[in-house]
Image: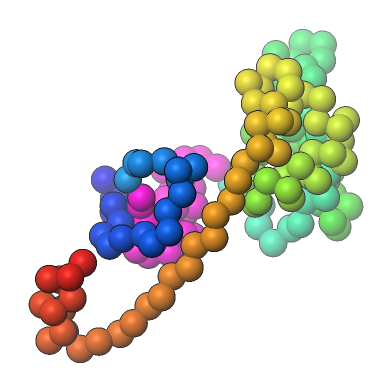
């Protein structure tokens, strides 16, 4: 609704069956605008410019009603959070969770198994940006 993601206009050459047949979206203001929108709509307090080196699921203890996530950063800080958003390629995510208890929680209650993650296939996408005078817009609109 805020225009953060809009349907892509144009065509993708060399699509694969694994890409599905759904609508493709683009972020006109850049991918960072998606994260900015999420933060602006919540009470989240992001921790930025810190590299995570370990992620561990900590089970609920005693009177504490819910489990937590323990994140260790490269600077040695170890903190617990209610939730963690990890936005990096799957191989990096697997390496991060393997630093904890081997990701045993992954095949448990999460509903996502290690095999699901290792089965993810990536396809390369490249973007080409060309700048033309406004007078050329009508010519391109007829062919896109």
Q: Position of residue 97 (x, y in %)?
A: 79, 39
Q: Position of residue 66 (x, y in %)?
A: 70, 18
Q: Which residues are magenta?
A: 24-44
Residue 143 image-quadrant placement: bottom left
Residue 31 is inside the magenta segment: yes
Q: Residue furthest top?
A: 63
Residue 57 is inside the magenta segment: no
Q: Is residue 71 left or right of residue 109?
A: right
Q: Residue at x 63, y 21 (%)?
A: 111
Q: Position of residue 139 (x, y in %)?
A: 13, 79
Residue 12 image-quadrant placement: bottom left
Which part of the image, by quadrant, shows the N terminus?
top left
Looking at the image, how many numbered discs can be counted on the residues?
Answer: 0
Residue 83 sits above or below residue 38 on the image: above
Q: Residue at x 49, y 42 (%)?
A: 18
Residue 129 image-quadrant placement: bottom left
Q: Which is nearer the eye, 63 or 143?
A: 143
In the rendered image, is residue 63 in sight?
yes
């Amino acid at each position: 609704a805020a225009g953060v993601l809009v349907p892509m206009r144009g065509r993708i050459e060399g699509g694969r069956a694994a890409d599905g047949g759904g609508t493709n979206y683009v972020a006109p203001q850049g991918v960072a605008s998606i994260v900015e929108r999420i933060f602006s709509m919540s009470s989240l307090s992001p921790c930025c410019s810190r590299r995570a080196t370990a992620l561990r699921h900590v089970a609920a203890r005693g009177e504490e009603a819910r489990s937590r996530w323990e994140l260790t950063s490269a600077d040695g800080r170890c903190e617990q959070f209610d939730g963690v958003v990890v936005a990096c390629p799957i191989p990096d995510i697997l390496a991060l969770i393997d630093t904890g208890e081997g990701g045993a929680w992954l095949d448990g209650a999460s509903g996502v198994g290690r095999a699901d993650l290792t089965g993810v296939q990536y396809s390369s996408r490249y973007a080409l940006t060309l700048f033309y005078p406004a007078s050329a817009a009508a010519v391109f609109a007829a062919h896109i």
